[in-house]
Image (spheres, helix red, strand yellow):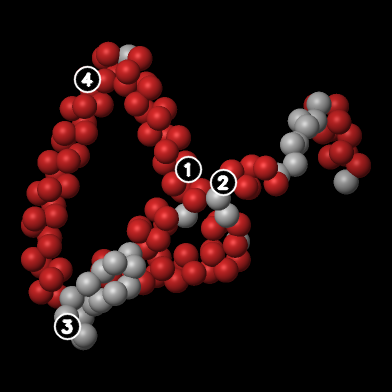
Amino acid sequence: LKSNGVPSAAARLARLPVVRTACGKLWLLYADAKRSHPNLRTVCEALEESVAALGTVASVGVSPVLVQLEPHSEFRPPVSTANDVACKSLDWLEATFPVLHTPTEQVNISLPLLKPHSSSERDRDHCGSL
């Protein structure tokens, strides 16, 4: 939650089951790749440390400015405006696609298994629609 009680768009997005599942699968893939390839692990760990350091520096430098700007009603920091737009977009997505709140296991079970078409079936289907 942001200081005004409004959840951040990033937090809302991270709570969606499909996003949680995708992030979990990507994390496992990333961890497996690092474990399997020592050279890749070295590069990834160096990048992770750099990103963490940059994030800390950016957070320390920007936070006081945002705290000072936030209470002033005549000026809305770009971060707040972007969060508001993102939250409204998420409202629309969630209303339009309620399946976003369905656990991914349930979505996987309810989807029919799709049989891939052969190229001749695909060509016939496409030509038939002309």
Please indicate whether residue 125 sits to the left or right of residue 4 in the image: right
Q: Residues within 10 Å of mark 4 (few under 14, many from 20)?
A: few
Name the kind of residue labelled 4 in the image.
Thr
**In terms of sequence position, does the residue under pointer 4 or pointer 1 come before the other?**
1
x and y, in percent, of residue 88 in the image: 45, 71
Q: Are marks 1 and 3 in contact (CB under 8 Å)?
A: no
* Comes first in the chain, label 1 or label 2: 1
Kindly state the secondary structure of the residue where label 3 is placed. loop
Picture disc at residue 72: 3
- From the viewer's side, name the closer residue of 36 and 43: 36
| For residue 106, above or below residue 36 | below
Estimate the x, y position of residue 55 in percent, counting from the top left.
17, 47
Above-or-below relation of 129 to 102: above
Give the image location of residue 17, x and y in percent: 49, 51
Report how far apart the C-alphas of labels 4 and 3 lie in the structure: 46 Å
Residue of label 1: 21
First in sequence: mark 1 vs mark 3: 1
Which quarter of the rendering shows the N terminus?
A: bottom left
The residue carrying mark 2 is 104
Q: Residue under label 4, please give it.
A: 42
